[in-house]
Amino acid sequence: MYSHRSTLHKPTAEHNVDRSARFTILHLEDDPTDALLIHRHITRGFPNAAITHVTDGPAYVEALQRTCFDLILSDYRLPTYDGDQALALAREQCPNVPFIMVTGELGEDFAIERLQQGAQNYVLKDNLKRLIPAIDAALHEAAEHRQLMTAEAKFQDLNEELATANEELRVQNEELEAVGDKYRTLFDFTPIPYLVTNPDGVIQEANRAADKLLGPHAGDLLRRSIFQFADEKSLASLERLLRRCTRPHPPDRIELSDIVFHPWRHNGRRHSPLSLIAHVIVEPDLGK
């Protein structure tokens, strides 16, 4: 249910209701003379209004159950029903439909209480010139409320879609992390030496097998040039491999196996007299 004002609305330029449109109105009024007079006032301002007139509580309840209206008008005092019951049912059955009480004498405190209960406005039967402005304001406010509800629903849908996308992304990240952990484990513990370089040939990663055979610990390999360790017979293959990474649109990953390396050198002397064969992986993105 949307908020309500506690005073009568006057016609303003902002109440840009299309009075030629077809509005459906449910009118609860037991006095046929009053009903006819009110209907005449309505059709002067809203010539295409479709008015459903009911005279008692059961007919009013049936009408609300049968269809939805754009506006509800109700007298307050009826023989076996009253405006409070009509208002309470309207707020329960169709809380977004404006409700205006059109009745006889109504004290200010009494009227304010009905507005607080959910009525949009009230009009006294001896002052029906205020009826059209009141309907104008109520329909305008209802239209604004529908627009706000639509915007809020769209915003809620977007939030739900974003939450779903974030959850999917979180799951994907966890899966990628799991795959990355498996890759790191395989990379580190495979017995085959692996070296990862950038396009300049600078070593970025080395697994344990490469570290063990080329240097005493990883810090001695990382950021060094791979050409420091490659055998002269493998230099041409390495250079061709690295050149492929400097071409336009290079592949994401290039791998070359059977590259012969000499073990780590310290003070111009080899750490070990043995040579070894390793796999070299070049990742162009590492050079950015």
Image (cartoon, grey):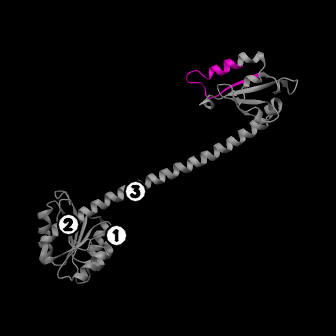
Q: Quadrant of the C terminus?
A: top right
Mark 3 or mark 1, earlier in chain: 1
Name the secondary structure under disc 1. helix
In percent of width and height, residue 206 lies at 74, 33
Near mark 3 (Cα within 10 A), the count class, few <14, some 14-19 or many ≥20, is: few
Mark 1 or mark 2, earlier in chain: 1
**Residue in the image at 12% along x and 78% along y:** 126
In this picture, residue 211 sits left or right of residue 256: right
Q: Residue flagged by tag 2: what amino acid is it? A: Ile
**Residue 236 lies within the magenta run:** no
**Residue in the image at 58% along x and 20% along y:** 247
Q: Tell me the tag on residue 135.
A: 2
Q: Quadrant of the N terminus?
A: bottom left
Q: Which residue is mark 3?
A: 153
Q: Which residue is mark 1?
A: 93
Magenta stretch bounds: 238-258
**Residue in the image at 29% along x and 71% along y:** 62
Name the secondary structure under disc 2. helix
In this picture, residue 251 sits left or right of residue 11: right
- Marks 1 and 2 sit apart, C-alpha to C-alpha, by 20 Å
Taking 233 as reference, is 223 above or below it? below
Q: Tell me the tag on residue 264.
A: none
